[in-house]
């Protein structure tokens, strides 16, 4: 209680002095059990469209940043499931629409999930991909689907964004 009173007093004094209180953006934790808020430096603010790299490909994909999507997605073609050493695997191709760079991948199938799109359901495979966004490199799950009818070949969902970035839809292309 004492800390709350001190905080209120400090805030009131700052307001009386005509100073603006500094607001630091934070990311809400994934779990309701977690009580702390993770503070993020302003350099982790990204826009509604950003470049992502999927090594070993050299050219970036423009990705729509979608805080409403649970899992990220990538435009893949020739998606085929096969078995290797008793496990389910997926082979697929990625082609960058802008540069025409093409790469073939074989990845272990993580699982298949049901995705709802415009009232219909579609079962999609999920694979783990290497990703580079800005200066950060990591692995993330992507659903594979043909996104030819979409403006962007990739969609970055909460599985990548959570704890990593704050999204400001008024800006784009903030990452190199």
Image: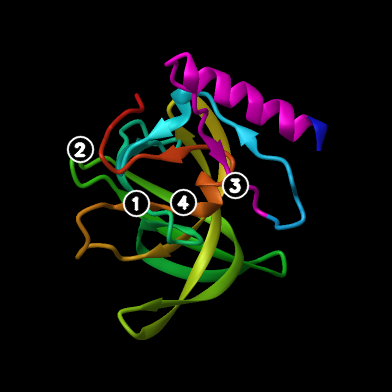
Tag shown at residue 105: 4
C-alpha distance separating marks 4 and 1: 16 Å
Indicate how the structure is coloured in the image: rainbow
Residue located beneath label 1 in the image: 154
C-alpha distance separating marks 1 and 3: 24 Å
Q: Position of residue 54 (x, y in %)?
A: 43, 40
Nearest-to-viewer mark from 2 and 1: 1
Q: Residues within 10 Å of mark 2 (few under 14, many from 20)?
A: few
Residue located beneath label 3 in the image: 28
Residue drawn at x 28%, y 32% as measured from the top left:
173
The tag earlier along the polypeptide, 4 or 1, is 4
C-alpha distance separating marks 3 and 2: 37 Å
Residue drawn at x 45%, y 23% as measured from the top left:
43
Residue located beneath label 2 in the image: 99
Q: Position of residue 4 (x, y in %)?
A: 73, 34
Tag shown at residue 44: none
Asked if 121 appears above or below 37 in the picture, the reply is: below
- 56 left or right of 63? right
Q: How many marks?
A: 4
Magenta stretch bounds: 3-30
Do the residues bearing badges 4 and 1 touch, measured as CB atoms within 8 Å?
no
C-alpha distance separating marks 2 and 1: 15 Å
Where residue 93 sits, quadrant-wise, is: bottom left
Nearest-to-viewer mark from 2 and 4: 2
Where residue 151 sits, quadrant-wise, is: bottom left
The tag earlier along the polypeptide, 4 or 3, is 3
Asked if 8 appears above or below 65 in the picture, the reply is: above
Do the residues bearing badges 3 and 2 touch, measured as CB atoms within 8 Å?
no
C-alpha distance separating marks 4 and 3: 35 Å
Q: Does residue 73 show up magenta in the picture?
A: no
The tag earlier along the polypeptide, 1 or 3, is 3
């Amino acid at each position: 209680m004492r800390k709350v009173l001190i905080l209120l007093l400090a805030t009131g004094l700052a307001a009386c002095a005509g100073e603006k209180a500094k607001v630091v953006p934070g990311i809400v934790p994934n779990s309701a059990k977690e009580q702390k808020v993770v503070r993020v430096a302003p350099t982790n603010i990204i826009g509604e469209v950003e470049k992502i790299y999927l090594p070993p490909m050299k050219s970036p994909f423009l990705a729509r940043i979608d805080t409403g999507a649970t899992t990220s997605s990538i435009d893949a073609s020739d998606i085929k499931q096969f078995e290797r050493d008793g496990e389910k695997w997926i082979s697929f191709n990625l082609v960058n629409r802008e540069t025409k760079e093409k790469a073939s991948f074989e990845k272990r199938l993580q699982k298949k999930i049901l995705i709802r799109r415009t009232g219909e359901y579609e079962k999609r495979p999920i694979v783990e991909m290497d990703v580079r966004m800005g200066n950060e490199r990591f692995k993330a799950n992507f659903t594979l689907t043909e996104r030819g009818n979409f403006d962007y070949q990739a969609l970055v969902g909460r599985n990548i964004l959570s704890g990593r970035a704050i999204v400001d839809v008024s800006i784009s292309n903030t990452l190199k």
